[in-house]
Amino acid sequence: MNSRERILGRVRRALADASADEAPIARDYLREHGQRTAAQTVELLAENLADYRAVVHRTDEAGLPALIAGLLEKRGAASVLVPSGLDEGWLAATGVTRVADRAESTPDELDRVDSVVTACAVAVAETGTIVLDGSPDQGRRRITLVPDHHVCVVRVPEQVVSSVPQGLERLDPARPLTWISGPSATSDIELDRVEGVHGPRTLEVILVGGA
Amino acid sequence: MSGTYLGMPAFPEAAREAVADTTLRGNLRHATHTIRAKRAKAVTEVSDWAELREAGKRIKDHTLRHLDRYLVQVEETVTAAGGIVHWAADAGEANEIVTRLVKMTGETEVVKVKSMATQEIGLNEALEAEGIHAYETDLAELIVQLGKDRPSHILVPAIHRNRGEIRDIFAREMSEWGRPAPEGLTDTPAELAEAARLHLREKFLRAKVGISGANFMVAETGTLVVVESEGNGRMCLTLPDTLISVVGIEKIVPTWQDLEVFLQTLPRSSTAERMNPYTSTWTGTTDEDGPQNFHLVLLDNGRTDTLADEVGRQALRCIRCSACLNVCPVYERAGGHAYGSVYPGPIGAILSPQLRGTGSEIDASLPYASSLCGACYDVCPVAIDIPEVLVHLRERVVQGGEVTREGNKVVLRPAKGHAAERAAMRAARWAFTHPGALRTGQRAASRSRRFHPRTLPGPGRAWSETRDLPPVPTEPFRDWWQRTRGGKDGDR
Ligand code: SF4
């Protein structure tokens, strides 16, 4: 008997006298916490992102290229990783060297890039979370991990949901997902919070609203 | 706590030990109290906590009730998504599978994400014996690994170490394992974290094989979920060519939607955050993004035996949030190592003896490492009635009865005479060397004295069969002393 059969057999024997009628799974918890307008939901997202030490910026479509250029300059970035499907206009105002997100880049190469700019799939206001799903404007999972500076653009209010349940509804489990709530952090040394051990130590989120 | 009735041991002995342990107790007290207070606040932010907790409990119960079906389903969905599924009945088999998979890659180094399942099976040691070095990459696990000791808390495994000790460990050990600590390293947490970042980055960037556990696996979609803070998980899950995940069979949730419950309750219960910094989900392999070889090792190792126990099986609902540790007055004083298992605290006291059986003295005594105050049950986000299971296991130890070991029903002999006394004395000695826990227990004993039986429950039964139990005083001596300063202030 192989282990698969052995384990399944043990499970079945273990459950032989378990009662058949079980309590139904009640889903009477809330779909979102509180009533908010779309604008208030965006406001809450901004607050919760900032509370978890992401740097939050707000602009409109027209102001976006200049804002991104300014953030890269302020950071002193010499190079920026660019996912293949990123809106070209977003980087129109910066002259920083672009590095394409390529499957064959080694982790070492990624480590030498200063910043990365991506879009996102959805953002969750109640938890201050942005979610990336590896779409062409977000790139492979590792490009938002190895560089020390991540700039993420969220379209508001379209990409913002209130809650975790609403976020999951919008996401495709077949895609690899990364949920990001603030920069990398650890509290392992005497519970002192330190930003960034392995992931980007600086997360800047740009909320882009209106035309 | 039956220890109250057994006569006082030499108090100086207890005091000496307690004093020697001030660092440990200070750290633990600070940690548990800080996290406890933060957690309470994080929970009050969510007005439907009670409903979420009930839903979490029922989802897990439902999953366990149909575990065979969901295991088969997760095998199908993971395979369809490009993963390869392996089944491991016990620790030895799991270690063999992982060792074989690593050897197939030709690598002699692997990077690891903190995982209790791999600690439980002793994977690092098994790999080491075959010439494969496993590097822990979570900051706390790195501290533990470099310091050559064992984790003491589920969430903050190196909480028993102070910053000065960590600095010394880094300065002394890092060069043995790779990039040395920077010259003149100080003990500020930021500098220590930076040293760890540099040391580990070198390993991440060249790693070809990653090993992880998982917080959840979704039967419907074949998706695995890892919840973390630092990003070392993301490194291990996405940079290597090969990813091997060792996951206990109880970690299944049926549907994608079910995650909405646990992704709300886990972070708040665990780190008291609205959401942990990083959550990764992956379904098999993805072209050109992340590992191209994915192996899932489904681990039994005593879980089906636990499932066979009607009362005890609820322990399999556990999502390893560590909330029960942080509220436990016994854990707070005793520390994680006292439990002698990878699962410390209240959950360890019910899970370890079930996974391993109560054959050894440590496992037989674990159900007694509790004052039965019930705080663990109150905070548990999946409503595991830990006190109920503790009492049940105590009975098992003392009275014996039918249990399942490695899939077979065996009848456990009662721990008679000497054995029962030994177990009780062991528990008592433990309590007496941890005066705080004893105090808590005594207060509980006084408050509940009208319910006290004339014989002891649990292991004490054999002992009290031949002895009369003294009545419990209306007030513990210590309380009376504190209140009256030994009668000087009058018995107010
Ligand atoms: S028993 Fe409950 S409180 Fe304790 S770690 Fe498990 S889920 Fe958390």
Image: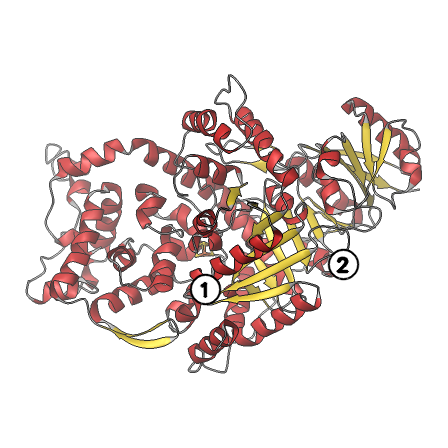
Is residue B99 shown left or right of residue A71? Answer: left
Task: Say above or below: A195 vs B219.
Answer: above
Q: Quadrant of the N terminus of chain B?
A: bottom left
Q: In the drawing, what numbered circle is on residue A170?
A: 2
Residue A46 visible to an observer of this rendering: no
Indicate the secondary structure of the residue bearing disc 1: helix
Q: Which residue is mark 1?
A: B316
Q: In the drawing, what numbered circle is on residue B121?
A: none
Q: Which of the two residues, B134 or A87, is positioned nearer the viewer here? A: B134
Task: Give coordinates of residue B125: x percent, y percent.
Answer: 43, 48
Q: Chain of mark 2?
A: A
Going by the numbered disc 1, the residue's amino acid type is: Leu
Task: Give coordinates of residue B470: x percent, y percent.
Answer: 9, 57
Going by the numbered disc 2, the residue's amino acid type is: Arg
Task: Report which quarter residue A62 is drawn in.
Answer: top right
Is residue B126 shown left or right of residue B210? Answer: left
Task: Say above or below: A106 vs A124.
Answer: above
Which quarter of the frame holds ligand 1? bottom left
Task: Say above or below: B491 vs A22.
Answer: above
Q: Quadrant of the C terminus of chain B?
A: top left
